Image (cartoon, grey):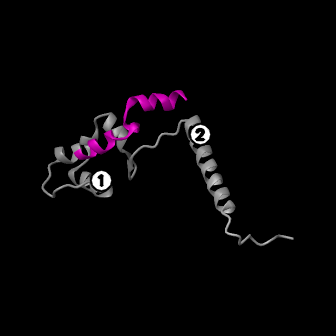
Amino acid sequence: MEQPPSTDGGDSDVDSLDHEDLSHMETVESVINEIGICHPIAYDIYDLCEYNRKAKLNSFTVSMLKEICLSFELLFKSRDTKAVLVSKVKQMTSEFPCSTEDLILICINT
């Protein structure tokens, strides 16, 4: 017969849950590292990290760049030029390791 949870003020259930959550997160991280999944920064179907790596951010239209900036909450002015918008997206993607060739090689070699 199942016993009701104790009401003695013990935190053993909470401690156990925290330990289980931590263990699960460590397992997930370990699996991701083992199989080499990289997290690209994407907008719609476009991998922005790859576009940055290949210097192709300039291929987006001004309206698309504005949509990307809005999506990632990058501040811009309505009169910003394409070059300014590209630099904002480039700066954002450059902050993440998935925009560098080094990480791509790590992911492929894993």
**Residue, far front:** 8
Mark 1 surroundings within 10 Å by alpha-carbon count, few (fewer than 14), some (14 through 19), many (20 or more): many
Residue placed at 51% from the left, 30% from the top?
108
Relative to the observer, which residue lies in front, 66 or 110?
Answer: 110
Q: Is residue 94 magenta?
A: yes
Task: Check the image and report above or below for 82 versus 34.
Answer: below
Question: Is label 2 in a helix, a strand or a loop?
Answer: helix
Q: Which residues, given as a range, are shown in magenta?
A: 88-110
Earlier residue among tags 2 and 1: 2
Q: Which residue is situated farthest in the right direction here?
A: 1
Q: Which circle marks residue 68 in the picture?
A: 1
Amino acid type, mark 1: Ile
Image mark for residue 30? 2
- Residue 28: say if magenta: no
Residue 61 image offset from top left, x and y in percent: 23, 49
Q: Amino acid at mark 2?
A: Ser
